[in-house]
Amino acid sequence: MISLPIVDLPLKTVDRTAPRISVALPEVGRVQELKVPEYNLRAYLNSLLPLPLRTGFLGVDKSESPLLFDLMDPRPGSIVIIGDHDSGKIRLLKTLLYSLVMNNPDYEVKISLISARVSQWKYEYEHFQNYFVHFTNNYDHPAGKALLDVADLVESRQHGRNEGGCHLVIVDGFDTLPYMDFDIRLNFEWLLQEGPFFEVWPVVVMDSRTAAEQKKWLEKFKTRIFGRIRDAVTAAGVSNISQSPLPNLLAGKEFAVKISSREHHFYLPDSI
């Protein structure tokens, strides 16, 4: 069950006192556009007043209102992104990453990236290296060490030490983690539960087939974001959205998330 707060977010102001991930509600009487929003990430963010520090951007709804991710509000909990191989999961992660880099100095946001496809992240690592603490394949020994390091960071913050900025832990490819050493799996499970309370955010990508096979792990994530899942049986098995629309989402562009009891669809930028 996802429980994320919804607040009004006008396009020309941001209220830091309001908790988020949030969906801005359209103004009363505003005509709803039926077409899918097409926009450039940098231009769209420039149309807003500067976002508060440690606030990421995920996409816009059909009214072109933003979906924001407040990394200082622990209530969304750990996040998993699920979809078919061509659903746009990496594009969603990169949208979040670029929005944070564009609006935060490197001492406010740190990133640990564990990926089955590090070559797809090479550009970001080379250009934003000061933001990265870890950058490793998901099958290398350093992947396990990276997870243990981040767990140590959370424990340190629990004891009031090593405050620092927020920390985004991206696990791009979950297929190896269930088979890592018991100590690593135990620490990662603890990280999913405790990390967001100390501004350490696990954001995990699962292929739809992997999600269907790892339901015990899936249940440990408080927030599930879905891209297109063509197989209706798989979609129904991994989704917490009733009468699942997941087979009909636009691949590479459209995602769905349940916020409290409401289902929201949002759309990625066409370019950065």
Image (tube, rainbow, N blue to C red):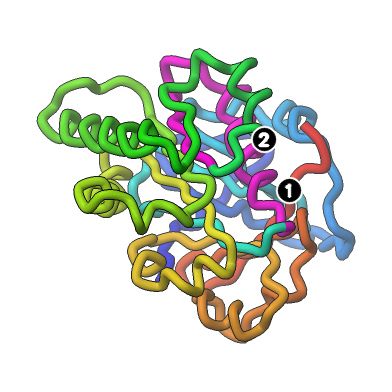
Q: Disc 2 residue type?
A: Gln
- Dot 2 crowding, Cα within 10 Å, few <14, some 14–19, many 20+: few
- Dot 1 crowding, Cα within 10 Å, few <14, some 14–19, many 20+: many
Q: CA distance from mark 1 to mark 2?
A: 18 Å
Residue 110 pos. (x, y %) = 43, 25
Residue 88 pos. (x, y %) = 71, 52
Label 1 vs 2, first from the N-terminus: 2
**Which residue is at a point 82% across and 63% down the rendered structure image?**
32
Viewer-side label of 1, 2: 2
**Which residue is at a point 36% across and 53% down the rendered structure image?**
77
Q: Which quadrant, please, contains the C terminus?
A: top right
Q: Is residue 38 left or right of residue 216?
A: right
Residue furthest out toward the left: 159
Which type of secondary structure does the marked residue at label 1 adopt? loop
Q: Is residue 48 left or right of residue 78?
A: right
Q: For residue 49, what is the image quadrant?
A: top right
- Region in magenta: 86-115
Q: Is residue 241 left or right of residue 114?
A: right
- The residue that label 1 is drawn on is 268
**Depicted 200 relative to depicted 133: above or below:** below
Which type of secondary structure does the marked residue at label 2 adopt? helix
**Depicted 223 relative to depicted 47: above or below:** below
Residue furthest out toward the right: 35
**Which residue is at a point 26% across and 49% down the rendered structure image?**
181
Residue 222 pos. (x, y %) = 38, 61
Q: Disc 1 residue type?
A: Leu
Q: Nearer the viewer, residue 34 or 12?
A: 34
Viewer can see residue 66: no
- The residue that label 2 is drawn on is 120
Q: Which quadrant, please, contains the N terminus?
A: bottom left
**Which residue is at a point 59% across and 34% down the rendered structure image?**
118
